[in-house]
Image (cartoon, helix red, strand yellow):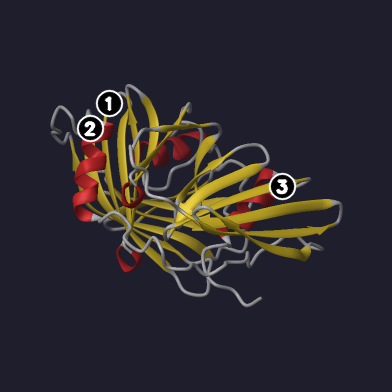
Amino acid sequence: MKSYRAEAELSIKTGTEPQVYSVEIWHSKPSYYRVNLKNAKKDQSQIILRNDEGVFVLTPALNKSFRFQSDWPQNSSQAYLFESLVRDVLKDKDAVFKSTDKAYVFETKTNYQNNNVIPKQEITFSKKDLAPVSVKLMDPDQNVLVQVDFSNVKFDAKFDKDAFDTKRNMSSAQMEVPTTAEQDKPFSVLYPSDVPQGMERKEEKELQTSSGKRVIVTYNGNKKSFTLIQEKARVSATGTAISVSGEPVDLGFTVGALTEDSVTWSYNGVDYMLAAKGLTQEELLMVARSVYEKSSK
């Protein structure tokens, strides 16, 4: 296999209602990737790109691209990448295998950084051509929290010379997702629905900045604390790539940047920064992943 392109539907079932995304995946050996995640309902679109210049996360609606020094996607499981699924099957000496009329089904361990929430996955490959059919990521009680259903998998696909070019991808995506026009609309403050045991909200402050309001919410308890900062995202005038430290991390509803003690992300035209003391990265990600819908105060 020199390359492939595929489409998939990604469902995340951790909130009160499932979040559904369409995903377009391109890969050309050895290390070119383009993963386009779109949420049709909210006009959200993000592209994860890997090319000769590095790993980028593009947010077309804000004309922003973030550049990571990262070995993504080699560093952890990626449910929508075929070769990552194969790698997880090969790595797990205790993988459970069964064969059905049309498919090969494996149950394996996942290899997510700091993620005991979804330790297992069920991966189904087509018997006809070994193309991926579906992936179900499960919690320790076998409940499916994330599901990926593949369609239109084409091996040895042909790509244009600049298919993985950062500028080309940004401009073509902006034709589909208009740059956010709702810059002056007030945003709703979101609160995490999952926080480590014993932690509670202590303080909420609202500041006025040159670009509108900034809301700072602080939680603490059990000798741990975290602060969640929210403010309206600004559209970048230049579109110049911003270098960020950390690793790109899939939060489900968006892709963020994870460092040892912080996660930053943009969603629905709002910038979020979560900084913590005393939390493990797993707890940090648990909190971040639970910030995407309005929860009761």
User: Mark 2 highlights which residue?
Assistant: 3
Is 43 situated above or below 37? below
Q: What element carries label 2?
A: strand
Is 152 on the left-hand or right-hand side of 186? left
Is 123 situated above or below 167? below
User: Mark 1 highlights which residue?
Assistant: 29
- Residue lying at 76% horizontally and 64% vertically, measured from the top left: 203
Label 3: few (<14), some (14–19) or many (≥20) C-alpha neighbours in 10 Å? many
User: Mark 3 highlights which residue?
Assistant: 276
Relative image position of residue 169 (x, y in whole percent): 24, 39
Q: Which of 205 and 86 is in front in this view?
A: 205
Q: What element carries label 3?
A: strand
For the residue marked with disc 2, what is the amino acid? Ser
- Residue lying at 42% horizontally and 61% vertically, measured from the top left: 268
Q: Do the residues labelled 1 and 2 touch (CB within 8 Å)?
A: yes
Separation of marks 2 and 3 at Cα, in angstroms? 40 Å
